[in-house]
Amino acid sequence: MSERIFGGVLLLLSIAGIWIGWDYVPPISYEPVGPRAFPLLVLFLLGLCAVALMLDKKKSETAWAPAPVLKRIGLLFLIVLAYALLFDKLGFIVATALMTIPVARFFGGTWKQCVVGGIGLGVGMFFFFDRLLDVALPTGLWLNGILG
């Protein structure tokens, strides 16, 4: 029953977010898709997941994850929070690489794989979004002269 209540709250939250964000129009258009497309897409997917959660027919007892798993989830939350706080100052490439390394370690990657993957993901995603899709991403204070 708690899953259905939680799903209902999430569905109401997603509907309210879509209703609020639907009329958002920025004063200037600086990106091809605009700033409202991503939040609306995320809220729509949240609503779909909420409906799926409410319609689930399983009647299983809710079991909490063991303590080590909850500890890892807390650490992942702190990593993503640090990523959000350092995103503008360090820039997309450095912040993404620094966030990817510990996340990849949580999934069992070696240090070499994590560092190479983090740098590759940061650089690759920057050029994909900034150069190909023309989405403005921060380069950070130290890369402004090189990439800007």
Image (cartoon, helix red, strand yellow):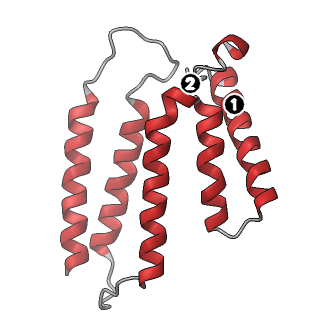
Mark in the foreground, 1 or 2: 2
Q: Who's the residue at 74% across and 36% down the image?
A: 124
Q: Residue furthest front?
A: 142
**Height in image: 34 above or below 96?**
above
Element marked by disc 2? loop
Disc ID at residue 137: 2
- Where residue 65 sits in the image (x, y, percent)? 40, 82
* Image position of 69 (left or right of 14): right
Q: Which residue is mark 1?
A: 128
- Where residue 99 sits in the image (x, y, percent)? 58, 48
Tell me whether the residue at label 1 lies in contact with that at label 2, contact meaning CB atoms closer than 8 angstroms: no
Q: Who's the residue at 20% across and 64% down the image?
A: 8
- Where residue 44 sits in the image (x, y, percent)? 36, 47
Image quarter of the N terminus = bottom left
* Image position of 45 (left or right of 106): left
Q: Residues within 10 Å of mark 2 (few under 14, many from 20)?
A: some
Three-letter amino acid code of the residue under disc 2: Leu
The image quadrant that residue 103 belongs to is bottom right
Q: Who's the residue at 44% across and 72% down the image?
A: 71
